[in-house]
Amino acid sequence: MNRRISVVMAGAMVLALAACSGASSTSKGDTGGAAAGQNKGKTLKVWVMEGTNPDATGYFKSVSTDFSKKTGAKLDVQFQPWAGAHDKFATSIAGGTVPDVAEVGTTWTTEFAGTGALTDLTDRVAKAGLKADLVKGLTESGTLDGKLYGMPWYAGVRSIVYNKALFKAAGITTMPTDWKGLLAAVEALKASNPKAIPFPIAGDSQYGAMPFIWGAGGDIATLNGKTWTSTINSPKAVEGLKFYTGLALDHGSSTAAASTWNEAALLKAFAQGNVGMMISGNWTIGKIAKEAPAMAKNIGAFPIPSRETGVAGSFLGGSHLAIFKDSPNQDLAWEFVKMMTTGDQGAAWSKETGFFPGQVSAMNTILASNDPLVAPFAKQMVQAGRSVPTTPLYGQIQGAKIVESMLQSILTKRQTVEQATTVAAAAMDKIFAAKS
């Protein structure tokens, strides 16, 4: 994940994180500088994805200084572009040329863990007293067969971003907290401004559909023993997808063109000022404000509601820090991971990137800030952050765009929801049956 959030949101998060991080960079379970002599002359090789922090030079200079003081070792931080990172990881794992530690996208962690390449962090996390303070959704996506392979670092989540001017013109003063309220908002927007698009349903965005599957009590797939089975065609999942796509097909919330839109196209349409609301990530607020300054004052947000009153599950995307099993510096690598994900350095990273931290204590402080462009996303993340099925095989499902193809078939009326979900479930189960 490598997109940025707004300066306004980042500023609010800085204050919150500073409050929860305390004055010391020492994390729970630290060994401090006790091992500094043993580590003298050692260098820890680290891969970090390029772009999440627009200028990471100063940050990693500080990290390197702190790390050397604490451990006596040096850091060799190498930035990797997201575009080719997956293939580079796979090649490095196969060739035995992995770094000691790497930032790994949340949808990749279990894939690489499944190859046996990553170190099991479960006992280290428990011993450090950090287990209870990790954000659930990030922990889920870093867990395979009950063992944690990815230490939660940072994340973003999707909620509903809305146009305050259009909402005001439509007389909407209370944000929807269930599907009934969401539909009422669509109808009010339609009546107020027939030229506006109340709530576009993007056919090329799997993450827009997931909150409605989860919000109806359904799921994408379930694990029985060691076997995954698709449940995207279960009655509850179908109910959620019927409501979601029905907003477009039955209630005119969308436009025909949106059946092929991805999230970038959705964002572009919203920035033009004629979209009432959309499902979008916390990192997009700053992008809208930067690219369409006139929209900055008109941006609002609220959590995606579930069928009944409550917050719907929303995919929690971001990154873990993982230690490679082939690293000869396991203890040293863990000291680095702790430093990066907790304490002052963890807070500094969130400050500079604007993404949410992976600790519940830090997130709770952010929730208490009541910033209207921060709190809704934080609430969505803490209360209902979800992961896609934690199996290496799900990457193949995403690569085949099974969910997106299903959505587009429904939105273009080529198939009913029942037909499209049956096809999608069969395609998923074929991949699950192939094993890893």
Image (cartoon, helix red, strand yellow):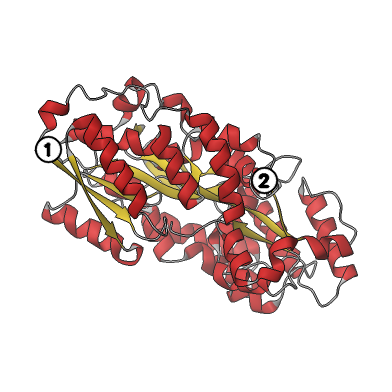
Locate residue 331: give its quadrant.
Answer: top left
> Residue at left 15%, top 55%?
94
Percent coordinates x, y for residue 21 in the rendering: 47, 31
Front residue of 263/239: it is 263
Residue 217 in percent (x, y) is at 64, 42
Residue 120 in view (yes/no): no
Q: Earlier in the sequence, mark 1 or mark 2?
A: 1
Circles 1, 2 touching at the beta carbon (< 8 Å): no
* Residue neighbourhood size for the residue with mark 2, other residues' Cα within 10 Å, grouped as few (<14), some (14–19), many (≥20): many
Question: Residue 13 at what x, y percent from top left?
Answer: 57, 43
Q: Residue at x 33, y 50 (%)?
A: 104
Image position of 141 (left or right of 276): left
Q: Is residue 319 above or below residue 258?
A: above
User: Number of marks in the image?
Assistant: 2
Q: Is residue 434 left or right of residue 6?
A: left
- Determine the image quadrant of residue 208: bottom right
Instruction: Say which of 356 and 322 sits in front.
Output: 356
Q: Nearer the viewer, residue 415 or 106?
A: 106
Q: Is residue 23 left or right of residue 78?
A: right
Circle 1 sits on which residue? 328
- In the rendered image, which residue does mark 2 sit on? 376
Cα distance between the residues tagged 1 and 2: 43 Å
Task: Determine whether the residue tagged by mark 2 lies in a helix, strand or loop.
Answer: helix
> What residue is at 78 percent from the left and 60 percent from the top?
164
Q: Amino acid at mark 2?
A: Pro
Residue 228 is marked as: none
- Number of other residues with Cα within 10 Å of mark 1, as a class: few under 14, some 14 to 19, many 20 or more: few
Residue ID at (66%, 38%): 369
Q: Tell me where residue 7 appears, x and y as whole percent.
A: 57, 55
Q: Secondary structure at mark 1?
A: loop
Amino acid type assigned to the residue bearing label 1 in the image:
Pro
Query: The N terminus lies in which quarter of the figure?
Result: bottom left
